[in-house]
Image (cartoon, grey):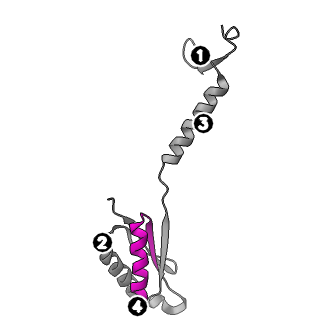
Amino acid sequence: MAEEQELDLVEISPNASPPVCKIMDYKKFVYEQKKREKAMKSKASKVIIKEIRFGPNTDDHDYEFKKKHAIKFLKDGAKLKAYVFFKGRSIIYKDQGEILLLKLAQELEDLGKVEQMPKLEGKRMIMFIAPKKK
């Protein structure tokens, strides 16, 4: 029957009893399947992560400047990775670094929620903030 219609006999489910087959244009079927997969992939949301780096002794002006950038990133819908980088012996100021990150989290409370509280990883204290849904 497939040869008469100049189409292909495609085995849909080989494990069924009896096996399920269908008469169709196989190339068209594969094309449609790829098209569906591509559409599903394009609808999947991509997560953008923006980073902001502080030092343990960042002064107020620099802090405000970086906070403005953080606000912009969260409004654009990107996740924010704020971290304090400790150089050399500045690791003794890790409590100041944590205070700085918690202060940032408190000031950005209306724009985003803290996904991960400040955590020390090596020479960095990292905190993640995710934007709030509109």
Q: Earlier in the sequence, mark 2 or mark 1?
A: 1
Q: Earlier in the sequence, mark 4 or mark 1?
A: 1
The residue identified by callout 3 is 34
Residue for point 65% across, 21% down: 25
Question: Do residues under tags 2 and 3 come within 8 Å of each other at their CB atoms?
Answer: no
Question: Whole-percent x and y of residue 33?
Answer: 58, 33
Q: Secondary structure beneath disc 1?
A: strand
The residue identified by callout 1 is 22
Q: Earlier in the sequence, mark 2 or mark 4?
A: 4
What span is in magenta? Answer: 57-83
Question: Do residues under tags 4 and 1 come within 8 Å of each other at their CB atoms?
Answer: no
Residue for point 41% across, 72% down: 72
Cα distance between the residues tagged 2 and 4: 20 Å
- Name the amino acid, label 4: His
Q: Is residue 62 left or right of residue 108?
A: right
Is the residue marked by circle 2 packed among few (<14), some (14-19), or many (20+) residues within 10 Å? some
Q: Secondary structure beneath disc 4?
A: helix
